[in-house]
Amino acid sequence: MAGFLDDIEPLKQTALAELKAAPDLAALEQAKGAWIGPNGKFTALMKQLGTFSKEEKPAAGKLINAAKIELEAALVARREERELAAALPKEPTDFTLPGRRRALGKLHPLTQVTEDIVRAFRKIGFAVADGPEIEDEYHCFDALNTPADHPARDSQDTFYLNTSDKRLMRTHTSSVQIRVMKSQPPPVRIIVPGRVYRRDNADATHNPTFHQIEGLYVDKGVTVGDLKGTVEFVFKELMGSDVKIRFRPHYFSYTEPSYEIDFTNVLVKKMGKDWLEIAGCGMVHPQVFENVGYDPTVWTGWAFGFGIERIAMLRYSINDIRLFYENDVRFLRNF
Ligand code: DAH
């Protein structure tokens, strides 16, 4: 009897250690069976109680019962732990991933168009760059070779801030060309979607703020042919394979030669027009390369800029630009 009682404590300790070491739910169930299941070692001890005398039984029974209760409690605690661990994801969760679907609302049509344009450019290796909406004259005009007396600088066209250093709301995303080229050596292959500001009075086709996408490609031996091919690819991705584009000579201070891009497809024809002017572009002016510290005898490049609202209006047959900014849900629900 004394030996029997002495065995209980070490047996219990072994059982507790085994329950604790069980790596998963299956191992835990196995340990449970080995110790307190119908064929377990503690159950066997209980059965031996029958062989004890009347005097010995209560003390021995109490001891075994206490040990069994302790083991059962340990089992429950351990099972909860294991169940929780099994329910947690195996891989760390990335909370920045997009959900399967939006829980609420929709993307604004301008955002949808911007994302489509960005997607098309990503396919051909362009990265998205960004820059500030509050700019200075250097990045918006000077470095882009725009003369001091150019009408775009006029306060009739540009919103100047009330600061001593003549800061302004950028009139175009071309300012980001300068920021990117100054921050990295060539080659460069970027697009810049962003908001721009001009002192236009709001009417059906103008608004004091709108959005552009700038593009810049700098490498060795880049040609107008690459520019035309790229623009054509992106517009076909956006508007369908019946798209045609043409380049018309134009003037921009930061490109030489410069062009305006006209565009046509069934939608343009439906509007009763042959062509629609959609963007400005050209080969980066050597002076701009000088300004950012790129050697114009080594590097060539092209740039373009087009209005996102223009494209969205065409795509969705919208004839009033102001609808985009009113945030009337009856309008937004259509997209
Ligand atoms: N910045 C011009 C605008 O706002 C568009 C533009 C024309 C951008 C020619 C360019 C370019 O990069 O090369 O009207």
Image (cartoon, grey):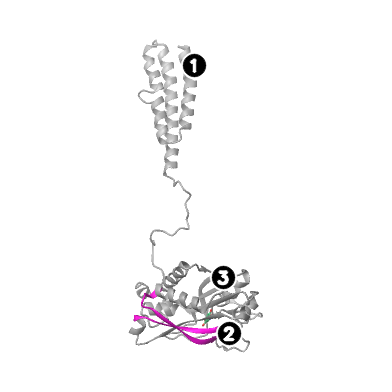
Q: Is residue 261 magenta?
A: yes
Disc 3 to disc 1: CB gap under 8 Å: no
Please indicate whether residue 2 sits to the left or right of residue 313 in the image.
Answer: right
Against 147, residue 113 (above or below) is: above
Q: Which residue is mark 1?
A: 6
Give how far apart the Cα atoms at labels 3 and 1 are: 81 Å
Q: Nearer the viewer, mark 2 or mark 1?
A: 2
Please give the name of the residue rendered at 43% of the width and 74% of the height, measured from the top-left corner.
233
Q: Amino acid at mark 3?
A: Val
Q: Can I make out residue 140 in this image?
A: yes
Please indicate whether residue 42 sits to the left or right of residue 218 in the image.
Answer: left
Q: Can I make out residue 210 in this image?
A: no
Neighbours of disc 2 within 10 Å: few (<14), some (14-19), many (20+): some
Using the rendered view, name the quadrant where residue 101 is placed: bottom left
Spot occupied by residue 133 in the image (x, y as percentages of width and height):
56, 75
Q: Is mark 2 within 8 Å of ligand 1?
A: no
Against 206, residue 80 (above or below) is: above
Q: Amino acid at mark 2?
A: Ser
Spot occupied by residue 76 in the image (x, y as percentages of width and height):
42, 34
Q: Amino acid at mark 1?
A: Asp
Viewer-nearest residue: 260 or 156: 260
| Disc with the residue nearer the chain's start (3 vs 1) | 1
Q: Which residues are magenta?
A: 238-266
Quarter occupied by the N terminus: top left
Neighbours of disc 3 within 10 Å: few (<14), some (14-19), many (20+): some
**Which label belongs to residue 253?**
2
Q: Secondary structure at mark 1?
A: helix
Q: Is residue 105 magenta?
A: no
The residue furthest front is 221
| Disc with the residue nearer the chain's start (2 vs 1) | 1
| Disc with the residue nearer the chain's start (3 vs 2) | 3
Q: Which residue is mark 3?
A: 188
